Image (spheres, rainbow, N blue to C red):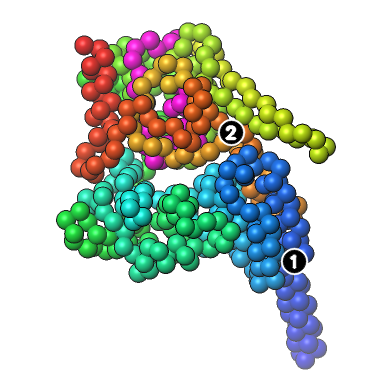
């Protein structure tokens, strides 16, 4: 019996030793991956110079932090925070952990006279929003003053005195970490102060890629965050057939927060034109073998596809219209096939490529080409032609304006 106990103890010791070795963090590999990421950012991130973030500061600071990393989760956060330095929501790892920041929040804040004010609420996706919080000033987040929360945000090489950077950070803080609460202390328009728990808001759930209805002979198509699903083209065609005889069409892009791909977008746009039309401009800067940087740019076209819808089209956009949703909006306007109504969009900049790490089983995404409206406006700076500032949660102001516009066009 003692012999068996001794053998079992040895096995346990060996297993413990193996487990310890497997879970041990290899700081040399993290350093290699850090250098690789910074090199890729330097070479391929097309907005790097626009962001005014010193790469030498990044190298020095993050290199100094490597010895402090003690777990795989801390390693993921290490690379997340480095990408956050560029205050660009399009830069991301394709993985996350419990202590990672979410990608977005159901409310959006803008700075007015330096103070954070709720300017947009994701009204179309929330089931139980009742408190009128549009225009409310955020005093605290989880009991921490606004200025202190920005100061504590884990970036170190960007300019936290910049209003643009501060606005990006405060919205990232509102997105919050997956494993932490998001309780806001708000000062309402009537000067009342309330506690508002973002995590008590419930989102509408839809298993359908697309939903469609007809109201007053106006077709309304809503994309349910599905622009990245190639099957959307077929689903769009099915819904489209039922709406061909309507007097006008509304395409709701206010839930495309997850972006998508141009294959799906071009498939949709092709149903609205009878000849090839330009829909966006690409711009990259190439440099090979240490030689001179040379700009390359081109206009991308959409080709007609199937039976064409000839009646007026309105597209609804907002703060949760992201990436390919933004491309779809500027594309329809560039082709002169739709009127765009809504607020600012998500402002996700550029065309993305994935870059693998040498020592990780996940990768990161960088913007490698700038994208423009055919009129030359950078996609991330586009403002809807018919701008609607959200003033209340009591009604869908953007949809109401879209319906009114089609009715006026078809009198």
Vertical comparison of 299 with 252: above or below: above
Q: Residue 112: where, in percent of width, then height?
A: 33, 50
CB of mark 2 within 8 Å of CB of mark 1?
A: no
Q: Residue 301: where, in percent of width, then height?
A: 56, 17
Q: Residue at x 38, y 37 (%)?
A: 344
Quadrant the C terminus occupies: top left
The residue furthest left is 190
The boundaries of the magenta stretch are: 307-332
Q: Which residue is mark 2?
A: 370
Query: Mark 2: which secondary structure?
Result: strand
Task: Say which of marks 2 and 1 sits in front.
Answer: 2
Q: Residue at x 51, y 21 (%)?
A: 374
For residue 395, side relative to residue 155 (left or right): left
| Residue 168 visible to the viewer | no
For residue 58, which quarter of the picture?
Answer: bottom right
Q: Which residue is mark 1?
A: 26
For residue 39, side relative to residue 251 (left or right): right
The residue furthest right is 289
The residue furthest bottom is 2
Q: Residue at x 31, y 40 (%)?
A: 124
Q: Residue 186: where, in percent of width, then height?
A: 27, 60
């Amino acid at each position: 019996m003692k012999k068996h106990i001794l053998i079992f103890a040895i096995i346990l010791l060996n297993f413990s030793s193996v487990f310890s070795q497997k879970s041990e963090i290899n700081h040399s590999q993290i350093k290699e991956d850090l250098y690789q990421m910074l090199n890729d950012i330097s070479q391929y991130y097309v907005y790097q110079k626009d962001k005014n973030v010193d790469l030498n500061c990044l190298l020095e600071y993050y290199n100094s932090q490597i010895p402090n990393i003690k777990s795989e989760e801390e390693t993921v956060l290490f690379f997340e925070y480095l990408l956050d330095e560029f205050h660009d929501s399009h830069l991301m790892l394709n993985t996350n952990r419990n202590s990672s920041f979410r990608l977005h929040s159901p409310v959006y804040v803008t700075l007015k006279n330096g103070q954070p004010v709720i300017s947009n609420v994701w009204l179309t996706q929330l089931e139980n929003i009742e408190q009128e919080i549009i225009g409310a000033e955020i005093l605290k987040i989880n009991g921490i003053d606004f200025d202190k929360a920005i100061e504590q945000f884990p970036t170190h090489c960007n300019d936290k005195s910049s209003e643009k950077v501060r606005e990006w950070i405060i919205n990232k803080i509102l997105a919050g970490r997956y494993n932490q609460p998001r309780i806001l202390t708000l000062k309402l328009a009537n000067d009342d102060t309330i506690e508002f728990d973002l995590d008590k808001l419930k989102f509408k759930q839809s298993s359908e890629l697309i939903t469609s209805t007809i109201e007053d002979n106006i077709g309304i198509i809503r994309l349910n965050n599905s622009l990245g699903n190639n099957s959307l083209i077929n689903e769009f065609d099915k819904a489209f057939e039922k709406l061909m005889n309507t007097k006008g069409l509304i395409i709701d892009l206010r839930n495309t927060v997850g972006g998508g791909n141009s294959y799906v977008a071009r498939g949709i746009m092709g149903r609205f034109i009878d000849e090839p039309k330009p829909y966006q401009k690409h711009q990259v800067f190439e440099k090979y073998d240490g030689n001179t940087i040379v700009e390359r740019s081109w206009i991308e076209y959409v080709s007609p596809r199937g039976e064409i819808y000839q009646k007026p089209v309105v597209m609804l956009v907002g703060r949760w219209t992201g990436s390919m949703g933004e491309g779809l909006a500027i594309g329809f306007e560039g082709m002169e096939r739709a009127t765009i109504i809504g607020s600012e969009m998500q402002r996700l900049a550029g065309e993305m490529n994935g870059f693998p790490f040498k020592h990780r089983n996940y990768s990161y995404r960088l913007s490698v080409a700038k994208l423009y409206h055919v009129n030359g406006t950078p996609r991330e700076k586009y403002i809807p032609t018919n701008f609607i500032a959200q003033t209340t949660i009591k009604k869908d102001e953007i949809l109401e304006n879209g319906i009114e516009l089609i009715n006026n066009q078809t009198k």
